[in-house]
Image: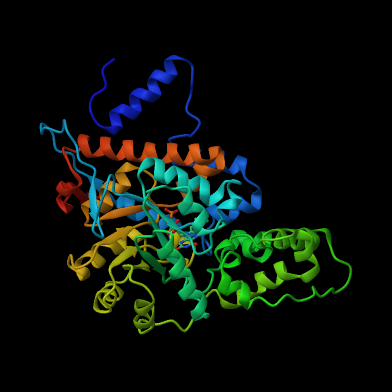
Amino acid sequence: MSTPPGVGPQRQTEIYLAGIRGRRPTIPFDPGKLERLARSRMTAQAFAYVAGGAGAESTMAANRAALDRWRIVPRVLRDVSGRDLTVELLGRRLPTPFLLAPVGVLELAHRDADVGAARAAAAEGVPMIFSNQASRPMEACAGAMGDGVRWFQLYRSTADELVASFLRRAEACGCDAIVVTLDTKMLGWRSRDLDFAHLPFASGRGIAQYTSDPVFRSMVEPAAVERSGRPTPAAIRTLVQATRSYPGSFRQNLRSGVGVAAVRKVMEVYSRPAQTWADFAWLREQTRLPIVVKGIVHPDDARLAVEHGLDGIVVSNHGGRQVDGAIGSMDALPGVIEAVGGRIPVLFDSGVRGGADAFKALALGATAVLLGRPYVYGLAIDGEAGVRDVIRNLVADFDLTLALSGCRSVSELRPECLQLAP
Ligand SMILES: Cc1cc2nc3c(=O)[nH]c(=O)nc-3n(C[C@H](O)[C@H](O)[C@H](O)COP(=O)(O)O)c2cc1C
């Protein structure tokens, strides 16, 4: 069997050849099956945290509905034998238009957590955006990535000196850009987590950027753990987990109460509800890196981002995790693209599950798309290898969608490739 050129056909051939030898893929291709298999590999609380959204989760549904409303109109009899999936983003040519979205608390999916995802991203040539709420320090991820492209996502906390330290570390570990997430001034009303009364940060999960930071550590004042009544088994487990999450000797940390104190400090400082556009002047002084803002869905906010000299936008509603009943991310994209008018790159996420979704977002003018939950599910199923497979499948699917729609390169994608469903 000779393989037609391009990553899509090559991936198909690899899978079908393995099938001849009786090997079936570890990672399901259907997004629903992928989610269900990941669910079977995670604790109920962990799965709820990853899969859940705000309120009745209608924004998650809106994300899918908005993507589905647009239909691709394929063209035929064009030469699509050689395809170019590369895109130019912030002065760098990337092999594909995909990045891994910043996702916190990846230890809920797999013990390799962020480091496993970082290795996979680097191996597949896809940039990874390190989360502010990561389970492993950015230095550990950067160290696992070689020359792989990485960005750092920041939540602007109330502790300026801590923000400055995060930015210094991001620069030192080779990040290309800072992504400031704007839609999470506080946590959304996440029904699944509320049902379990489960917040990962409360037990010291997803706070590795903090506990590995010298400025943060100087802010934590160890305090004896107050006891009120007989401790329950759950309370003891939380104490052990929080203590274990703090670097250093478990015994000493338990004695000093520093693990619990760190958790409290994170909860106290992590968000800055008073943050406004004016705060970017200060942030700009703290870093030489481009600043991309994530979580924009209104054209006026997009205009403000440009006016404040920001370097890029991610159209996103945080995967429906923040505001229930919000506009689907794809419904927001055209307005933002128009408002920005090509002055800065616009990226897209929330609901991307296959190559066609990426095709649609790029056709409407996005420069690249961020992959969220699907790679977390790959991580849960098979660690680093699972993330690699999810990325490879998505890129292959995208390549085939491009070719079968009559396009040879990402730069050929235009709104005319699409139609709104009647
Ligand atoms: C479990 C989970 C944790 C997330 N953590 C962060 C985070 O720390 N910072 C951030 O900017 N976005 C975070 N996001 C949002 C993602 O970056 C992205 O916007 C979202 O996953 C896109 O939606 P989708 O996964 O449904 O495609 C998180 C999303 C999930 C599912």
- Residue 363 or 227: which is nearer the viewer? 227
Q: Position of residue 12 (x, y in %)?
A: 34, 27
Residue at 89%, 68% in the rendered image? 230
Image: 146 above or below 298 = above
Q: Is residue 101 visible?
A: no
Residue drawn at point x = 18 percent, y = 39 percent = 74
Q: Quadrant of residue 337?
A: bottom left
Q: Residue at x 61, y 41 (%)?
A: 41
Q: Is residue 243 left or right of residue 356?
A: right
**Where is residue 302 drawn, in percent x and y?**
28, 72
**Whole-percent x, y for residue 109 in the image:** 58, 48
The number of numbered badges drawn on the structure is: 0
Which image quadrant: the N terminus?
top left
Looking at the image, is 299 positioned above or below residue 352? below
Which residue is outermost to the right? 230
Residue 274 placement, left or right of 281: right
Model colouring: rainbow
Depth check, front residue: 103 or 59: 103
Q: Quadrant of residue 122?
A: top left
Asked if one can make out residue 387 in the rendered structure from this viewpoint, the answer is yes
Task: Look at 54% across and 59% down and name the residue there.
Answer: 137
Q: Viewer-proximal residue, 26 or 164?
A: 164
User: Residue 46, position in %: x, y?
Assistant: 62, 52
